[in-house]
Amino acid sequence: MGSGPSIPDVSVPRDRVVVVTGGNTGLGYEAAKHIAMMGATVIIACRSEQRAMEAIERMNKEFREAKERGEKNIIQDDKLNVEFMLLDLASLKSTMNFIAMFKSSGRKLHVLLCNAGVGLVVRGYTEDGYEMHFQVNYLGHFLLVAHLLPIMKQSGDDCRIVFVSSSAHEYGNFNLEKAQAKIETDYSRMKYYGNSKMYQIQHMSCLVRRLQDSNVSVTCLHPGIVATEINRNYSDMRCFHGMIRCMNNTGCFKSSYQGAITLIDAAVNPKWKGVNDVYFVKTKPAATASAARNKQYQEDLWKYSLHCLQDYLSDDVISALEGLK
C-alpha cells in the first residue's frame, strides 16, 4: 500500500496573506498553523476572540516543539505570524464588519480559504432569516468573496480562493424555492448540509466563468470524513450517531491534520497555480455530482444569491464581481 497525501514541501513568503475562516479549530486550525509554519502571514477569522487567541497560543507552542524536533521545511522565526479577526458568518452585519476591518488594514490578500461551516444542525435560522447551513457555509462566504475579490485582483500573481466543500454535496437537492426550509417537513439535516456544499461547488464554477484571464483562481475540495467539532451537531440522532461512533472506533475517520492536507495543498502548492474549477479529493482532481455541474442551476443560484445580498452589494461591487470592470 502506498502512503497517503502529504503536505507539500514549499516555503511561503512572509508577505503572502492568507485568510482562513474558522481557523481556530479542526481543519482550519491545522491549515492555518501549517501555512504559517511555511512562512505566510495568516489571519484566522472566527467568531470567538478567546478561542482564537487560545488557538494562536497553541499553534506557537506546537511550532516551538516542531523546531525543537528539528522538523525540516519550517521557518525559524521566534513565532508564527498569525492574527485574529472577528467574523461570524451567521451574521451579515458581522461579515460586513470583517470586510470593512480588512479593507481598512490596507493589506493585500493572496489566499482566501473558505473553511468555516456548520453541519447537520437542527432546523434553525440566522439573525438575517436564512437557513443556518445556507448562510454560514455558503452565503456568508459569497459576501466575503464579493467584497474581497477586488483586493485579490490587485494583490499580484497567483491569488487563490478555496472552498471546503464535501462529498455530502451528492445528497443535495437543488430547489431554490425550498432553499430556506420554510416548511418544517421539507427539512432534512443531511440534505440541507449537502445543499450548502453543492452551492459552494456551483459558486466556484460561476466565479471561474467571470474571472477568465484573471490572477485569481478558484477551486474546492472534499477533505475526507474527519473527526472535528462538527460531529457534535448530530449527537442526538441515535442511529446516525451510532454509525459515526462505530466508524470512529474502527479508524474510518481522518484526523484534522490528515483532512487539512488537501486544504493546505490547494492553498499553497505551486503546481496548482492558475488551476480553476477543480474539485480535489486526497489532493487530486475528482468528479462531482451532476447537479453541482449543471450550468443553469449554477446561474440560478448566482442570481438568487445576489438577490439575498442586495442590501450589502453596491453597483460597483456587483460590476466587479460580474467581471465588468
Image: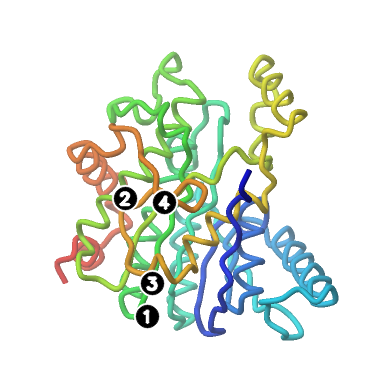
Q: Is residue 238 left or right of residue 318?
A: right
- How crowded pointer 3 is (Cα within 10 Å; few <14, some 14-19, many 20+) is rated as many
Residue under numbered circle 1: 155
Q: Quadrant of the C terminus?
A: bottom left
Under mark 2, the amino acid is Leu
User: In this orientation, which residue lies closer to the viewer: 140 or 96?
Assistant: 140
Looking at the image, do the residues carrying marks 4 and 1 touch, with CB atoms under 8 Å apart? no
Q: Which mark is residue 88?
A: none
Residue 93: % across, % down: 46, 56
Direction from residue 237 to residue 287 in the image, left or right: left
Q: Name the element at disc 4.
A: strand
Question: Residue tagged by mark 3?
Answer: 159
**Could you tell me residue 174's position as x and y percent?**
30, 29
The residue where tag 2 is placed is 309
Under tag 1, what secondary structure? loop
Q: Is residue 151 above or below residue 185?
A: below
Q: Are marks 3 and 1 in contact (CB under 8 Å)?
A: yes
Q: CA distance from mark 2 to mark 1?
A: 25 Å
Q: Residues within 10 Å of mark 4 (few under 14, many from 20)?
A: many
Identify the residue position indicated by label 4 in the image.
220
- Report x, y in % for residue 232: 69, 34
